[in-house]
Image: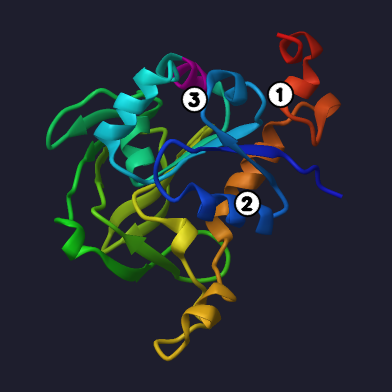
Amino acid sequence: MQPIPTIGVLALQGDYESHARALEQVNAQPKMVRTAAELEQVDGLIIPGGESTTFLKLLEREGLFAPLEEFARTRPTFGTCAGCILLAKRVTHPEQQSLGALDATVERNAYGRQIDSQIVTGATSLPGGPLEMVFIRAPRLIELGSGVEVLATRDGSPVLVRQKNILAATFHPELSHSDSSSESDSPDDLERNPDRRVHRYFAQMVRDALPESGEGKSSAQRDPIRQSR
């Protein structure tokens, strides 16, 4: 039986509840993260979508920027949409501060305003065929370092990438549904057909990073000294 990792979801803004539900569906234990102490208690972290400049203000206000920067250097971290912007080394349109964990250049709001948001299906190397992708004021990955692997594309452009412990998507995988759904499906039908391949992939990244002696335990549980702080 595979270990059940504890995966944090940065719960400062964005649809973090949907990410938490997705994690439960891929046999991971979600934990809302709002403080540096809570960040120490997780095996991996998802940074959800939202507004990247607002994220930066909230991270500074909560004293989370430096701890998150350190976490993303070595621990499994997944950024979606605004989270992807925060992880990139370079941000344009306009330039802004970032965590610098992903060797990539990201252009903010590359596909237009919120009214220009859309759902498309694109190619992916993840098992299961084409992947539904929901783009909401999405950024664009316009330059990737040589160590960045492309896992999915939209019209030939990368939209899901990995570099070592970092996973990043310019779309919202928590909103993706499987191709078994159709335009005639009701909202309840769509909720019953979520596509959790991206979350499953990240959960496996987190499992693979767990020390053999601490499978299925959070980082705080593996280190009683940290837990007692």
Residue at image point 70% right, 47% down: 28
Label 2 or label 1, whichever comes before in sequence order:
2
The amino acid sitting under disc 2 is Leu
Asked if the magenta segment contains residue 89, the reply would be no
Give the CA separation, mark 2 to mark 1: 18 Å
Q: Which of these two is toward me, 181 or 213?
A: 181
| Residue positioned 30% across, 61% down in the render | 154
Viewer-closest of 157 and 134: 134
Query: For the stretch drawn in magenta, what is the main secondary structure?
Result: helix
Q: Which residue is denoted by mark 3 in the rendering?
A: 72
The residue segment tinted magenta is 67-73
Query: In the image, is residue 66 above or below residue 83?
Result: above
In this view, the residue farthest toward the bottom is 184
Q: Which residue is mark 1?
A: 219
Where disc 3 sits, the SS reads helix
Sequence-wise first label, 3 or 1:
3
Q: Amino acid at mark 3?
A: Ala
Position of residue 153 relative to residue 121, above or below, is: above
Residues under numbered marks 3 and 2 in contact, where contact means CB atoms less than 8 Å apart: no
Residue 165 placed where, x, y %? 54, 32
Label 2 sits on a secondary structure element that is helix
Image position, residue 113 (x, y; %): 15, 56
If the image is split into quadrants, where does the C terminus sit?
Answer: top right
x and y percent of residue 63 in the render? 43, 15
Point 58% across, 26% down: residue = 75
- Disc 1 marks which amino acid? Ser
Provide the residue designation for mark 2.
23
Along the line of sight, the residue nearer the viewer: 171 or 184? 184
Does residue 185 appear in this view?
A: yes
